[in-house]
C-alpha cells in the first residue's frame, strides 16, 4: 500500500538500555510493524514535524506520562492497557511474530513473548484477569523463539496454572535447549514434584528463577518449591518479588523481606550453592494512575546500597538479581538487621506510610 506509518512507545522502556538492565520491547508495536511491512507500508518511529498516513501510540501503564505531541497524521490510534484496559490487537495482528528490527538496542539472541494469556488469580495490583480472563494457551515456544534466538523472555502471568499445556511447553524448552526467563515470576504454590523436576532441568537466563512472595503465607510455599527444585539438582539463584504497600502494612512488609534477608545469610554461611534475593516492589493501584506508591522515588539509597523498584509486577523494567546483593554489607544496609534499623530508612515510605494501611481497593 506504500503508506507511511509512525509508531510511538509512550513507556519507552526499550529505547535506552541501562547497565545491567533487561531490555523489553513493546510487543504490540513490534507486531503492528510486522503487519504493515507485510502490507508494503513504510514503518518508523513517529516524528512531530512529519506527515503520516497513520500513527500508533501505545501505552502499557496508566501511570506512564502521556505523549502530548500533536502528530501530523491522517489517523492517530491510541491503544494499550495504559489507555483502555479492554484494548486488544486485532487477531490478524496479534498472531504475528514481532518485528524486532524497530528496536535496534534489543539483544540479537533474545526473543520475547507469551506462552499463555490470562490468570486464575485476582491480585489487587493486577489487571490481567479483567483484561485477559482465565488462563489459556496462546503461543508455542517455537513460535516465539524466531530468527535463531535461543534466549526467550516469557512474560506469562501464571504459566504453571496452564496444567498439561504448561508441562508440554516446559518439556519442549528443555528439549530445544532454550534459555528462558519467566520474568513475571512463577507461582510457588503450584510447584509440585513434576514441575520441580522440569524446572530444575531448564536453563534459566542468568541462572535465576523468579517467584512471587507477596503475602506471609507465600513464604512457606516458596521454601517448599525451592526445596523440591534443589532436590532435583537446581543450582541457580532465587529472585523474589515482594510486594510492599497495598493491603500490607509496614510491619508485615518488613517482616516478609527481613525473613528472606536472614535466609540468604544462612544459605551463604553454609555454602548452599544458591541464594535467595527479595526485590521490594511498591504497590500501585491499577485503577488510579495518580496513586502515589510507597516512596515515589524510583531508587532508595541507604549507605552504600541501591534498591531499585519495579513500577509494576507486569512492568517491563530492569530487574537485576543484585537488587539485594550477596555481599553482606549491601543487603544489611538495604534491609536492616532489626526493625528499628529498617525504620531509619524512612525514605522508603516517607509521607506515604498512611497509604500502606489503606484498604480502599477491592479486587475484582
Image (spheres, helix red, strand yellow):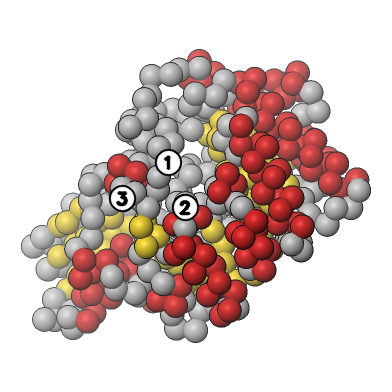
Residue 90 lies in quadrant:
bottom left
Compare residues 274 and 345 and report the one nearer the observer: 274
Residue 74 lies in quadrant:
bottom left
Q: Position of residue 265 (x, y in %)?
A: 84, 41
Compare residues 15 and 141 and report the one nearer the observer: 141
Which quarter of the rendered picture does the C terminus lie within?
top left
Q: Is residue 81 left or right of residue 145?
A: left
Q: Position of residue 29 (x, y in %)?
A: 30, 64
> Residue 121 shows which numbered tag?
1
Q: CA distance from mark 2 to mark 3?
A: 14 Å
Of circles 2 and 3, the one toward us is 2
Q: CA distance from mark 1 to mark 3?
A: 12 Å
Residue occupying the point 46% across, 43% down: 312
Compare residues 56 and 221 and report the one nearer the observer: 221
Disc 3 target residue:
132
Furthest-left residue in view?
74
Residue occupying the point 34% across, 44% down: 129
Q: Position of residue 249 (x, y in %)?
A: 57, 20
Compare residues 146 and 121 and report the one nearer the observer: 121
Q: Residues within 10 Å of mark 1 (few under 14, many from 20)?
A: some
> For numbered disc 1, what is the local secondary structure?
loop
Q: Position of residue 52 (x, y in %)?
A: 15, 67
Which quarter of the rendered picture does the N terminus lie within?
bottom left
Q: CA distance from mark 2 to mark 1?
A: 10 Å
Q: Pointers 2 and 1 in contact (CB under 8 A)? A: yes
> Residue 161 shows which numbered tag?
2
Q: Is residue 266 visible?
A: yes
Counting residues from the start of the chain, the first of labels 1 and 3 encountered is 1
> For numbered disc 2, what is the local secondary structure?
helix
Amino acid at each position: 500500500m506504500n503508506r507511511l506509518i509512525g509508531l510511538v512507545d509512550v513507556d519507552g522502556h526499550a529505547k535506552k538500555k541501562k547497565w545491567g538492565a533487561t531490555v523489553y520491547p513493546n510487543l504490540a508495536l513490534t507486531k503492528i510493524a510486522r503487519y504493515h511491512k507485510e502490507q508494503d507500508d513504510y514503518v518508523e518511529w513517529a516524528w512531530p514535524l512529519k506527515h503520516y498516513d497513520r500513527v500508533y501510540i501505545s501505552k502499557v501503564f496508566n501511570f506512564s506520562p502521556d505523549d502530548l505531541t500533536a502528530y501530523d497524521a491522517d489517523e492517530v490510534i491510541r491503544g494499550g492497557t495504559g489507555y483502555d484496559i479492554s484494548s486488544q490487537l486485532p487477531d490478524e495482528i496479534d498472531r504475528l511474530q514481532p518485528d524486532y528490527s524497530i528496536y535496534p538496542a534489543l539483544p540479537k539472541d533474545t526473543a520475547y513473548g507469551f506462552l499463555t494469556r490470562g490468570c486464575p488469580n485476582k491480585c489487587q495490583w493486577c489487571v490481567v484477569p479483567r483484561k485477559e480472563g482465565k488462563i489459556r494457551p496462546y503461543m508455542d515456544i517455537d513460535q516465539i523463539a524466531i530468527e535463531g534466538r535461543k534466549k526467550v523472555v516469557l512474560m506469562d502471568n501464571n504459566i504453571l496454572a496452564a496444567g498439561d499445556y504448561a508441562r508440554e511447553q516446559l518439556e519442549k524448552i528443555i528439549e530445544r535447549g532454550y534459555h528462558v526467563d519467566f520474568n513475571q515470576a512463577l507461582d510457588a504454590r503450584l510447584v509440585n514434584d513434576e514441575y520441580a523436576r522440569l524446572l530444575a532441568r531448564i536453563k534459566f537466563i542468568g541462572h535465576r528463577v523468579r517467584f512471587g512472595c507477596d503475602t506471609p503465607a507465600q513464604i512457606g510455599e516458596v521454601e517448599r518449591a525451592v526445596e523440591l527444585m534443589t532436590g532435583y539438582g537446581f543450582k541457580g539463584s532465587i529472585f523474589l518479588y515482594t510486594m510492599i504497600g497495598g493491603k500490607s502494612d509496614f510491619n508485615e512488609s518488613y517482616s516478609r523481606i527481613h525473613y528472606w534477608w536472614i535466609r540468604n545469610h544462612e544459605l551463604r554461611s553454609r555454602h548452599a550453592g544458591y541464594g535467595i534475593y527479595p526485590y521490594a516492589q511498591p504497590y500501585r493501584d491499577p485503577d488510579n494512575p495518580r496513586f502515589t506508591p510507597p516512596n515515589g522515588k524510583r531508587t532508595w539509597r541507604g549507605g552504600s546500597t541501591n534498591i531499585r523498584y519495579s513500577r509494576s509486577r507486569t512492568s517491563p523494567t530492569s530487574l537485576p538479581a543484585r537488587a539485594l546483593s550477596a555481599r553482606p554489607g549491601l543487603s544489611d544496609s538495604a534491609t536492616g538487621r532489626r526493625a528499628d534499623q529498617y525504620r531509619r530508612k524512612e525514605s522508603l515510605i516517607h509521607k506515604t506510610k498512611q497509604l500502606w494501611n489503606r484498604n480502599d481497593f477491592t479486587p475484582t
